[in-house]
Amino acid sequence: MDIFLQIWGGAGYLLAKILLSHAEGVRNDRKWRLAGWFLYILGLPAWVILLAGRQNWIAAANEAGGGPALILGLVLAWTGRYKAHPAIEWAVRIFTYLMIIIGTGYSLYTFGGITAFSQVLEIGVTVGFLLGSFLLAGKRPSGWLLYALMIISMGTLMLIQGKVILIVQQGVSLVFVALGFIRALRRSEKAATP
């Protein structure tokens, strides 16, 4: 079951990063963004199950809490908008923050504080994933940098836990995150040039 979940979650997230990275370099990016956000949502349950199964409560809550941000990215791509209504953005943020608080609180309770290196890595994953997803939903290049933090943290966590498929997936994902960042910067520069 563990191998199946690694393949399911790893493939969903890797393909999502490839498609979203590609979207940064094309003019008509709607279908690429739609597919990317959809694959993120599709891979999400496998990650939550894998992380919760190893008592990575902060990261599991992070992934679950990121669901609305991923759905927001999908909806924004579907409608062709770059920004959601402020009330919707606030609702996504509040849900995300609540999940972070719950996951961190439960982790602190379970481990008696921050006593494990894995918890520090989970915090890196959380910051990178949630803020990165939110920024990328609004087509902000800085989201890619936060995704890099997430990938490095998650890759290290998977290394510690011996999840070989996900270690490789995280390494390959980092390449596409770097490409996405470069493409997003170029897109931003073109948009800013009169």
Image: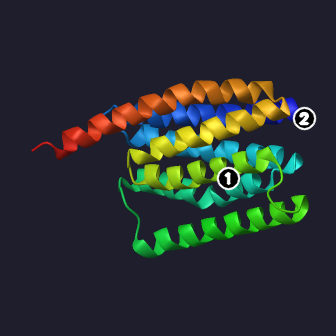
Q: Amino acid under label 2?
A: Met
Residue at the extreme left:
194
* Label 2, residues with CA under 10 Å away: few <14, some 14-19, many ≥20: few
Image location of residue 107, percent across then percent down: 82, 60
Q: Quarter of the image holding residue 68?
A: bottom right
Residue 127 x, y percent position in the rendering:
59, 53
Instruction: Kindly identify the residue that appears in the image at 46 percent across and 30 percent down.
Output: 178
Distance from Cα at disc 2 to Cα at disc 1: 26 Å
Q: Nearer the viewer, residue 121 or 115?
A: 115
Q: Residue 148 appears at what percent x and percent y?
A: 54, 38
- Say whether residue 132 is left or right of residue 158: left
| Left or right: where 77 falls relative to 168 | left
Q: Earlier in the sequence, mark 2 or mark 1?
A: 2
Q: Is residue 135 left or right of residue 47?
A: left
- Give the crowd class for mark 1: few <14, some 14-19, many >=20 residues within 10 Å: some
Indicate whether 161 appears above or below 99.
Answer: above
Which residue is pictured at 65% across the width and 47% down the height?
125
97, above or below 71, in the image: below
Label placed on residue 1? 2
**Residue 39, numbered label:** none
Q: Residue type at mark 1: give it.
A: Ile
The reply to whether residue 27 is visible in this rendering is: no
Label at residue 123: 1
Element type at mark 1:
helix
Report if residue 1 is visible in the image: yes
Which residue is the extreme one toward the bottom? 87
- Residue 79 position by quadrant: bottom left
Kindly identify the residue that appears in the image at 76 percent across and 25 percent down.
165
